[in-house]
Image (cartoon, rainbow, N blue to C red):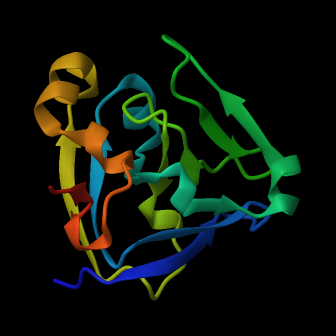
Amino acid sequence: MDYEVVMHNGGCHCKRVRWKVEAPSSVVVWQCSCSDCSMRGNTHFVVPSQKFELNEDSKQFLTTYTFGTHTAKHIFCKICGITSFYIPRSNPDGVAVTYKCVDPGTLKHVETRHFDGQNWESSYNRTGISTCSKIKPKEHYVLGNWFI
């Protein structure tokens, strides 16, 4: 597996929302079964917010939907409706990037893990997803999880 940290570019379908994110070329993506993610089919990897940069011109095309605890900020393009990134409830200090919205060429390997969003609290405690948005030394980042 390739753990090299690279700059990924991506965005929405109509290309009005564009961003870049620093993350490994091999990532763990989370397939969540909460009511929102399961309806949208969203599968994402989580990065510290400092590793994500939204193009300034993109902000005017974004809108946000919240529900339940209102911790998660489901951000999507007002024009095409695609959620290319959002602020997840599990990691309000991070950004969840929809891996299928990353431009081709920089993601070399994707491992899928499941997050039981129907039993949110127990899945949160069991999976260790909360560590994905923490900044640690580069050499401790392996497949979307930080290791000490």
The percent position of residue 88, horizontal first and vertical second, equals 46, 35
Q: Find residue 84 and report its image quarter.
A: bottom right
At x 37%, y 35%, the residue is 38
The residue lying toward the viewer, choosing from 49 and 135, is: 135
Q: Find residue 125 and report its image quarter.
A: top left
The percent position of residue 74, horizontal first and vertical second, equals 58, 34
Q: Is residue 129 left or right of residue 76?
A: left
Q: Find residue 26 and report its image quarter.
A: bottom left
Q: Is residue 126 left or right of residue 43?
A: left
At x 55%, y 16%, the residue is 70
- Is residue 12 visible in the rendered image? The answer is no
- Is residue 68 visible in the rendered image? The answer is yes
Q: Is residue 97 left or right of residue 122?
A: right
The percent position of residue 4, horizontal first and vertical second, equals 31, 84
At x 34%, y 26%, the residue is 34
At x 22%, y 85%, the residue is 2
The residue lying toward the viewer, choosing from 61 and 136, is: 136
On screen, residue 104 above or below 148:
below
On screen, residue 108 above or below 98:
below
Query: What is the quadrant of the N terminus in the image?
Result: bottom left
Q: Is residue 130 left or right of residue 77?
A: left
The percent position of residue 148, horizontal first and vertical second, equals 14, 55
